Image (cartoon, grey):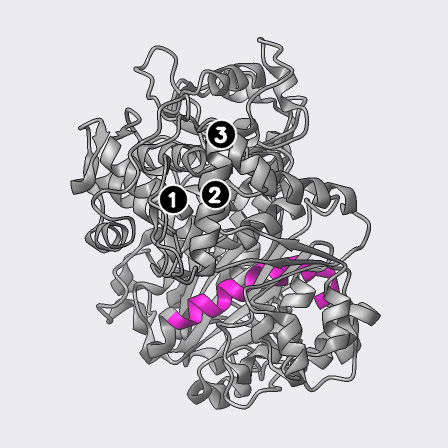
Amino acid sequence: MATYPAARTAPRDARATGFGHVATSALLPPDPSHLEAIVQSHERCGSLGISPIQAPDHAPVVRADLAVARERNRRLSAHSVPVMEMLLEQILATQSMVLLTDVQGTVLHSIGHDDFLARAAKVALAPGVNWSEQNKGTNAIGTSLVTENPTLVHADEHFMHANHFLTCTAAPIFDPRGNVVGVLDVTGDHHSFHSHTMGLVKMSARMIQNHWLMEDSRQALRLHFHGRLEYLGTLMEGVVAVGPDGKLHGANRAALDHLGMSGAALRMNTLAALFGVTLATLVDHFSASLASPLALRLPDGRQVHATARFNWPGWYRLGSAGESDLPASAHAAVQVAVAGETPRNTAPAAPLSQLSLRQLQTGDPQMDAVVERVKRVLDRDIAVLIQGETGSGKEVLARAIHLASKRADGPFVAVNCASIPESLIESELFGCEERAITGARRKGAPGKVMQAHGGTLFLDEIGDMPLPLQARLLRVLQEREATPLDSNRAAVADVAVISATHRPLREMMDAQRFREDLYYRLNGLVLRLPPLRERSDLMVLADKLLKRECRGRLPRLDEEVLRLMQGYGWPGNIRQLATVLRTAAALVGDEGVIAVQHLSEDFLHDARRTVGPEGPASLPSSEAQPAAASGATPEPAGVPRTLQQLELDTVKRVLEEAGGNISVAARRLGVSRNTIYRRLYWPPGSGR
């Protein structure tokens, strides 16, 4: 049996261990638990008969076996690769590599600094090579798999001498059931060690785990909790997934650590048993529109603070009220309040990315028609093309379509074709083989098409996609297969496709800037989102956005603000409205009334310039005809009438026939109320 240095089993004081880089470097302060883990790992390696001076086996598995391993761990890769790239951005200065392995320790993907790649090749930090303790002795990946804890192995803490020039930091990755499924690792030259690396690796592993849990629990209740209120909404919070029967289906690692139990033990419990609260109680709190975090007691007496998010069909039937017709916001993410605490007047609101189709119906006939058309083609394998101005809510609608479909449990992958450099968009969409791109950081990364497998691929700003790439995309849509860059192997791509653009695609086809065959493949159902200036639900949207932004008592809008908002053209659409109200909600504080001084200077200047100081006042509930609409001084005979003037005369005439009722006039003209406001109060030539 091979031996290992006696110093490895010496007393646990750092100066007595014999680990040169632990004992003498100020970079690594003494840590008894760390030294204990290293000593135990060296003992395991010795019992396995591994020699510290033997040449490691760097031979990778055969290509076919690596392909099988990658396919088996496709979901792990899909959630991990984007996080790996973000992690690499944080450690670029250290000239290190980021690796992802499966539960056996086989490297699935590796990305890193080119200056370190040559040295890394000597120890085979490449896909297909196994880094379990049985193969490479003590190392961060293998030891982390054994202990199921984040692990640092620095310099000569590695059992094999050949690896002493490395410093490795790894964290295990757990699936929602609490099982270890892989390891995220950062490896570099030992001189490049940085004390912050461990924190970054652990944070990245938590992000991967949370993304996986969120995807698996789209149709379940998710209870987010932590012992400290300020940690809610951070990577430190625990998250458990609860089914409609109250049973716990999964959790992130933070939740298991906080509860002190394994994934299997968690799944044997119920929400009521662990947290002392029922689903009906949560629904009742939500129905009461309370928004403060809920104080819960664990079985051991510890108190935690919790928020809940849920969106399964028919959940409202769990409430004691038995309401059959709850408001559209009932499917929103909800923050549940503490019984007995002072309620706030903000109704819980879902993130804009999680709105349902029903929540998009806020009273505007045009949006109602859009939603009804969507419902007719759901799950019929019909491509959807959304056209609309920037900020009109194209991605929000796309996500709502995804959530309403049978693919809701699958991923929703959005690609902004206008924001990706043309040189990278092909690899971004279709992925790339190992080292297919010279100097690229990501190697062997799956593309967005394959990341969306089983779910929905959203191609935003499709009109900005380069012509050569349009041909490749057309083949993917027709053949349902995606081939990575510089590869001859195609993979099945089971995706629903939703695309969106603000550009006139038909005109682009005529100018040969957009492929005609691709257009007719994307436009199975064309939906036009009306701009905000044409919608009749402006104030309904404003109310919902204010509820989303305000944490305390809901402020009201004074008459001058109402006048400006109703007369303004909103060139930035809903996105601009949300920004204006977010700023106003922050500035108003506890004053209770949003006035002009709470509006941003840029919006105020633009609104006053277009609406004018004498624009429309806020309308009474009777919607009586404003004074400006009553009668008009006729133009002198012989003066040419512009199209805008004729349009204005028509609006005034129909409004007069409707007895000043703007809603009736809007229906007769087939336009929105906002359109009538604009025609009445913006003079011809104003550009609106």
Pick whichever, 268 or 559, lies toward us: 559
Report the residue at 68% width, 29% height from top.
Answer: 313
Residue 87 lies within the magenta run: yes
Task: Name which quarter of the figure residue 132 lies in.
Answer: bottom right
> Label 1, label 3: how many angstroms apart (C-alpha)?
47 Å
Mark 1 or 2, nearer chain start: 2
x and y percentages locating residue 422 in the rendered image: 54, 82
> Label 1, label 2: how many angstroms apart (C-alpha)?
8 Å
Q: Which residue is mark 3?
A: 308
Q: Residues within 10 Å of mark 2 (few under 14, many from 20)?
A: many
Task: Name which quarter of the figure residue 435 lies in.
Answer: bottom right
Contact check, label 1 and label 3, Cβ < 8 Å = no
The quarter of the image holding the C terminus is: bottom left
Q: Is residue 229 left or right of residue 464?
A: left
Tag 2's secondary structure? helix
> Label 3, label 2: how many angstroms apart (C-alpha)?
49 Å
x and y percentages locating residue 190 in the rendered image: 36, 77
Q: Amino acid at mark 2?
A: Val
Report the residue at 40% width, 17% height from top.
Answer: 301
Q: Which residues are magenta?
A: 70-89
Tag 3's secondary structure? strand
The disc at residue 680 is 1
The disc at residue 651 is 2
